[in-house]
Image: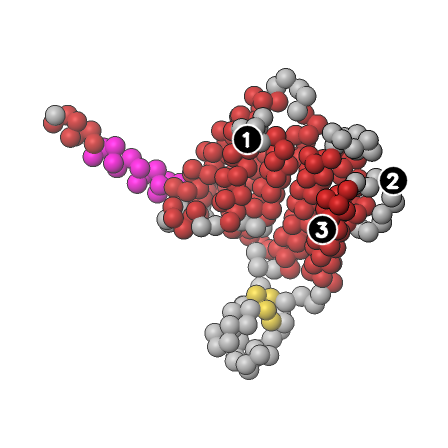
């Protein structure tokens, strides 16, 4: 009995130590923490590459083994990030976390959720919208125009592959013009850019409505991406009086309320 009592405090102390260690690795500024996060991001890119290439790999015998291995890696990452967070409850409130959990479910049940596997590419969106990425790889460009452009481009690319997967899952088997994933990608891009060659069209009312959704959503995201490229550069600095977030780089006063600003620069 005394031995069990002595062991329990030791076990209880292991979890706080683990959480402190993970918090240091995921949020610390030491060279070791930065290297750790770089490895995590590199693994994320490999996972995203697997998700994009998955439609071409499904017929290989080793596909399921790789799928479950990816699920194990993603589950470990989600669990580690949850422990490293200040609160598991606040961690679960983030939309990107739910995206990752959904991706994990599709990996754990690849056969039952075969038609939803294309949504795994949402991981690309969650990665580029995460603090982990911008505080590590993009720390030099955090809260700059480069971040805005990268996020807009990641959103556009994610939409293209999600829409492609949706078209492929919905029409590939019964559509004579959609022979494979590349045809679905071709249709999505031509619809998004309103090129509309007409060599591939989706049949029925559902197909026409899906085409309209892809066209409107794609144009909106494309315009958004173009705006981030051509609009005048603004720095992010919170005005203490009115809360205006974007200002000219050389602004001395807030143009909304006239408050004196002290925007830091690298000069």
Q: In the image, is residue 253 above or below residue 37?
A: below
Residue drawn where x is 65% and y is 48% of the image: 154
Q: Position of residue 26 (x, y in %)?
A: 45, 44
Are there few (<14), some (14-19), or many (20+) residues within 10 Å of tag 2?
few
Side (left or right) of 204 relative to 105: right
Ranked by sequence position, the earlier of labels 2 and 3 is 2
Q: In the image, is residue 179 above or below residue 189?
A: above
Which one is closest to the eye, mark 1 or mark 2? 2
Are there few (<14), some (14-19), or many (20+) residues within 10 Å of tag 3?
some
SS at badge 1: helix
Q: Quadrant of the N terminus?
A: top left
Labels 1 and 3 touching (C-beta < 8 A): no
Prevailing secondary structure of the magenta residues: helix
Q: In the image, is residue 142 above or below residue 123?
A: below
The residue at which mark 3 appears reads as 213
Are there few (<14), some (14-19), or many (20+) residues within 10 Å of tag 1?
many
Q: Position of residue 241 (x, y in %)?
A: 48, 77
| Segment colored magenta | 9-24
Location of residue 257 by image quarter: bottom right
Q: Position of residue 82 (x, y in %)?
A: 41, 42
């Amino acid at each position: 009995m005394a031995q069990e009592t002595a062991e329990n405090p030791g076990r209880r102390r292991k979890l706080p130590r683990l959480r402190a260690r993970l918090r240091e690795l995921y949020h610390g500024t030491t060279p070791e923490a930065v290297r750790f996060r770089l490895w995590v991001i590199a693994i994320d890119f490999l996972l995203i590459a697997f998700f994009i290439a998955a439609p071409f790999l499904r017929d290989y015998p080793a596909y399921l083994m790789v799928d479950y291995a990816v699920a194990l890696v993603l589950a470990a990452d989600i669990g580690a990030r949850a422990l490293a967070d200040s609160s598991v409850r606040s961690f679960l409130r983030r939309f990107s976390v739910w995206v990752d959990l959904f991706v994990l479910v599709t990996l754990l049940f690849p056969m039952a959720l075969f038609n939803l596997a294309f949504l795994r590419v949402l991981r690309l969106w969650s990665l580029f919208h995460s603090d982990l990425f911008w505080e590590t790889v993009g720390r030099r460009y955090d809260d700059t125009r480069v971040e805005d452009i990268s996020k807009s481009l990641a959103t556009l690319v994610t939409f293209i592959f999600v829409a492609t997967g949706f078209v492929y899952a919905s029409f590939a088997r019964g559509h004579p013009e959609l022979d494979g994933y590349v045809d679905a990608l071709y249709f999505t891009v031509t619809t998004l850019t309103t090129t509309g060659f007409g060599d591939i069209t989706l049949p029925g009312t559902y197909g026409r409505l899906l085409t309209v959704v892809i066209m409107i959503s794609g144009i909106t995201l494309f315009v958004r991406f173009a705006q981030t490229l051509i609009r005048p550069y603004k720095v992010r600095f919170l005005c203490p009086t009115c809360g205006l977030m974007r200002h000219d780089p050389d602004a001395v006063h807030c143009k909304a309320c006239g408050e004196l600003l002290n925007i830091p620069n690298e000069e």
